Amino acid sequence: MLKLGVIGNISRDTTEYAGSPHRHLLGGAALYIALAAARAGVAAAPIAVIGADLAEALRLPTLKAMSLDSVAIVDRPSCRFHLRYDQRHILASLDADYGAAELLTQHALDQAPHYGFVHVCCRLPLDPVPVLTALIDRHQPFSVDFIAASAPGMIAATAAFLPYAEFIFTNVSEYELLKRAVDATNLRVVTVTDGPRPVVLYRYGVPVVRTPIVQTKAIEVTGAGDTLTGTFLASMLRGEGRSLALRYAAQAATARVATIGISLR
C-alpha cells in the first residue's frame, strides 16, 4: 500500500459562529487530511512547516495515528487562521497570518519524493506550480484540493496540471470554477460537496456516484471537507471501490462536524 504525504498547512485556528464563543483549535488541511487517512487505515503524514509554538500540541494522543516525520519546526510563529461562518455554517471570511507556512513550498519539494502518493492542498501560501511540476516529472501519483478563499487564483494557476491528478476534491462553487478553467471530460475523478446535499463523484465529467450526507447537528464544521478527502483517499489506496470510498468519506465528514475538534488551551 502506498504511503500518503499531504502537503499543506498545520495551523492555529480561531473559528467564529454567530452567537457562539470563539473556539481556538489545532487545524490546517494537512493535519485534518492526514489524520483522517491514518484513522482509516493507511500510513499518512502531513508535509508542513510549523513554529515551535505548536510543537507540544502535535504530541497530543489523538494525533498518534499519523506520522510527523515530514513536519518541519522553525523559529517563526505558526500559521494562524481566523474563520468566520454564517448562519448556514458556510465560510463567510478568512483572515490569515501564514508565518512559518511561508517556507512550505521548498519543504514540500524536499519531502514529496519520500511518498508513494501525494495530496496537494492548493491553498496559500503554497506555490503549487513547482510542486505539481515535480510530481508529474517523476510520474508520482497525486491528488489536489482547493479552498473557496483562494480557489479562483489557484485553479487558474494549476489548470494545466489538473488532468494529471488522480482525484480532485471540490465543493459546488469550486467545481463551477474548475469547469471554466479545464474541460471536465479531461478530469479523471472529481468529488463535489454541496453542504447537506449528496456528494457527487464525476468521472471524466460524468456523474457516476452520488452519496447522501446523513443529517446531524453541526457543532464545528472546520475540517469536515478535509476529513472527507483523507478518508476517501485512504479507501482508494486500500483498493476499495469509488462508491464505498465515497460512502465512508461522507460518514467520516458527518462524524467530524458533530464534534468540537482539537482544542488549543
Image: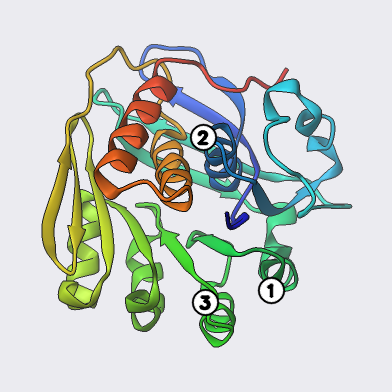
| Residue 57 picture quarter | top right
Nearer the camera: disc 1 or disc 2: 2
Residue 232 locus on image (x, y percent): 39, 44
Q: Nearer the viewer, residue 16 or 41?
A: 41
C-alpha distance separating marks 1 and 2: 26 Å
Q: Which residue is mark 2?
A: 40
Residue positioned 50% across, 27% down in the render: 15
Give amino acid for label 3: Leu
Q: Which residue is mark 1?
A: 109
Give the SS element for disc 2.
Answer: loop
Q: Nearer the viewer, residue 142 or 221?
A: 142
Give amino acid for label 2: Ala
**Dot 3 or dot 1, earlier in sequence:** 1
Residue positioned 65% across, 53% down in the render: 98
**Dot 2 or dot 3, earlier in sequence:** 2
Q: Which mark identifies residue 132?
A: 3
Image position of 26 with respect to 1: above or below: above
Labels 1 and 2 touching (C-beta < 8 A): no
| Residue 181 picture quarter | bottom left
Labels 2 and 3 touching (C-beta < 8 A): no
Residue 206 locus on image (x, y percent): 10, 62
Give the SS element for disc 1.
Answer: helix
C-alpha distance separating marks 2 and 3: 26 Å
Residue 25 locus on image (x, y percent): 61, 26
